[in-house]
Amino acid sequence: MEYRSIEEKKQQLFESFQQDYETAKAGKKIRPRLGNEMGINYMRERQTLSFLLHPELKETAYEIGYTIGVEITSDMIKGKTLPEIMDSNQPIANRDGYALEEIIEADENHAVYRHYECADCYGLPDIGDHICVYEAGVAAGMFSTALGKKCRVTETRCCAAGDPFCEFLVEVIE
Ligand SMILES: [Zn+2]
């Protein structure tokens, strides 16, 4: 009989994810034989086809990303103001290998940044869509937590819409 609530399972998952980050940071293998790395195609195919066939999933993906940003990765960034937070966030994408990030502008209420060679969308054909909603959600969760105010992050340009890079708009909404 399953007696645990979703909340309990979520907590267990968060702890396990944190542990995986610690393991990886210590240079150790999460999987004993195959290690921690895997090709990006695995993730891309599933994500992109999910969003193409079921566009309503994008909102859910943003919310899941937001939860990840708040619960799992928000301790990666420092800073009190939005420009400080953006500066602190900038090297993470490159370090973790999912994009090269450039900050275009940042003030107290909004910011714009770009991702070059994004793991999700770089090199995809123009399908007229903005698909990097997990990234936007994770960023929104991290920035909101660091700032103590709710932020929304919207992907305004994407390789899957024929743009040469992804561009994200950050808005402080409360
Ligand atoms: Zn994109």
Image (spheres, rainbow, N blue to C red):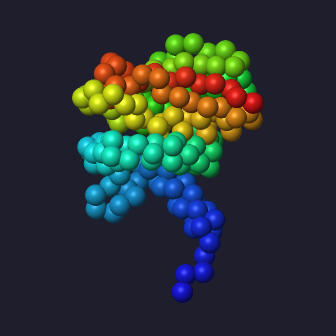
Q: Which residue is drawn at 61% across and 31% down?
A: 152
Whether residue 77 is visible:
no
| In the image, residue 168 above or below residue 140 | above
Q: Position of residue 126 (x, y in %)?
A: 27, 26
Indicate the position of residue 25 as horizontal and vertical percent values: 47, 46
* Picture quarter with the N terminus: bottom right
The foreground one among 94 and 47 is 47
Please state which of residues 135 and 15 is positioned toward the viewer in this rendering.
135
Q: In which quarter of the image is the C terminus?
A: top right
Image spot of residue 61 (x, y percent): 48, 46
Q: Which residue is drawn at 45% across and 31% down?
A: 93
The answer to whether residue 7 is left or right of residue 36 is right
106 to the left or right of 104: right
Residue at the extreme top: 105
How many numbered discs?
0
Query: For this rendering, which residue is in front, 12 or 137?
Result: 137
Q: Seen in the image, is 130 located left or right of residue 15?
A: left
Residue drawn at x 33%, y 18% is 164
Q: Nearer the viewer, residue 155 or 103?
A: 155
Residue 34 visible? The answer is yes
Q: In this view, does 39 lie above or below 97?
A: below
Q: Looking at the rendering, which quadrant does residue 145 occupy?
A: top right
Q: Give the residue at the far bottom of this rendering.
A: 1
**Residue 8, x across and y down, in percent:** 63, 68
Image point (47%, 23%), residue name: 156
